[in-house]
């Protein structure tokens, strides 16, 4: 009945992040900075549904993900999703006349973002199409809708956000194009980590707003007490 993100979990709260390093000017003798081509590609967020796992297996999955399973009603359903952000870039390098150094800047940046393994688990002890099954499914679909809403909120804003952020990398004057690529990678890896942590924090907050004590009481009291009895069975 809770959502977890094993690897990393949101509408974009109008996040503006910068790189750790200050904005760079144009090194002497280097060509002017040119904004790179930025491409953002989403992972699909279509949920997969699995009602083959037992109450005990769902509890174990929750525990492995670091989710507390203190309340029995948490063991009848689970929504699992991993936030995945991957980036790649290319650089354009140029050696100026009478200069042993190389001028480099990012020419293309690609980001893939989304939830690539969104899965809803419903305990196999819940009879399919029963009242309890439908109530638990409705709750888990709230978690699914939240993740889908997160993706929809971020995607339109990311290209501009990334363009602003990449401007801070500027033009690098280094001993080789390989040295520039390494420095760019360090900066961009740090930025992607910041972005991931920020999205995860907002996502966790929004998902927790679904899993309230009032919601759990509503669920366990539904269907003439069938879910409560099943939860008690899960507790042994």
Image (cartoon, rainbow, N blue to C red):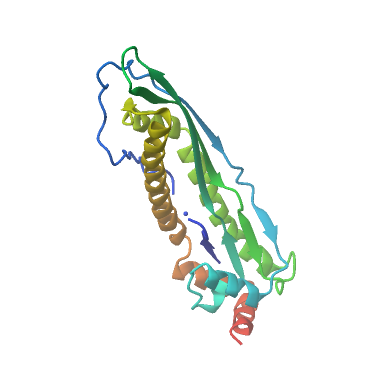
Residue at image coords 35%, 41%: 15
Q: Quadrant of residue 101?
A: top left
Measured from the top left, where is residue 170 in percent x and y?
A: 32, 27
Q: Is residue 116 left or right of residue 53?
A: left
In this view of the protein, can residue 202 be seen by the observer? yes
Q: Residue at x 46, y 39 (%)?
A: 154
- Please determine whether, in this image, residue 160 is positioned above or below residue 85: above
The residue lying furthest to the bottom in this view is 236
Across and down, in percent, residue 31 comes to: 33, 15
> Where residue 140 sits: x, y (%)?
58, 60
Residue 221 visible here: no
Numbered disc total: 0
Which residue is rendered at x = 64% and y = 79% of the image?
230
User: Of residues 144 and 15, which is closer to you in this image?
Assistant: 15
Q: Quadrant of the N terminus?
A: bottom right
From the viewer's perspective, tell me whether residue 188 is left or right of residue 70: left
Question: x%, y% of residue 59?
Answer: 58, 74
Please identify the residue farthest to the right as the structure is shown.
128
Decide: is 155 above or below 213.
above
Front residue (pair 107, 52): 107
């Amino acid at each position: 009945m809770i959502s977890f993100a094993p690897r990393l979990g949101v509408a974009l709260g109008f996040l503006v992040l910068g790189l750790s390093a200050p904005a760079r000017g144009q090194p002497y003798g280097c060509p002017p900075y040119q904004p790179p081509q930025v491409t953002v590609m989403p992972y699909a967020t279509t949920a997969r549904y699995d009602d083959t796992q037992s109450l005990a297996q769902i509890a174990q999955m929750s525990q492995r993900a670091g989710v507390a399973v203190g309340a029995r009603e948490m063991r009848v359903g689970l929504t699992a999703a991993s936030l995945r952000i991957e980036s790649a870039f290319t650089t354009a390098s140029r050696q100026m006349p009478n200069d042993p150094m190389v001028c480099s800047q990012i020419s293309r940046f690609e980001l893939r973002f989304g939830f690539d393994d969104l899965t809803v688990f419903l305990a196999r002890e819940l009879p399919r199409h029963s009242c309890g099954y439908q109530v638990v499914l409705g709750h888990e679909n709230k978690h699914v809708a939240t993740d889908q809403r997160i993706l929809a909120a971020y995607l339109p804003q990311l290209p501009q956000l990334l363009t602003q952020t990449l401007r801070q990398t500027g033009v690098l004057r280094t001993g080789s194009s390989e040295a520039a690529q390494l420095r760019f990678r360090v900066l961009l890896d740090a930025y992607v980590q910041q972005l991931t942590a920020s999205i995860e924090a907002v996502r966790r907050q929004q998902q927790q707003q679904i899993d309230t004590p009032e919601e759990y009481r509503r669920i366990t009291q539904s269907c003439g007490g069938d879910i409560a009895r099943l939860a008690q069975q899960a507790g042994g």
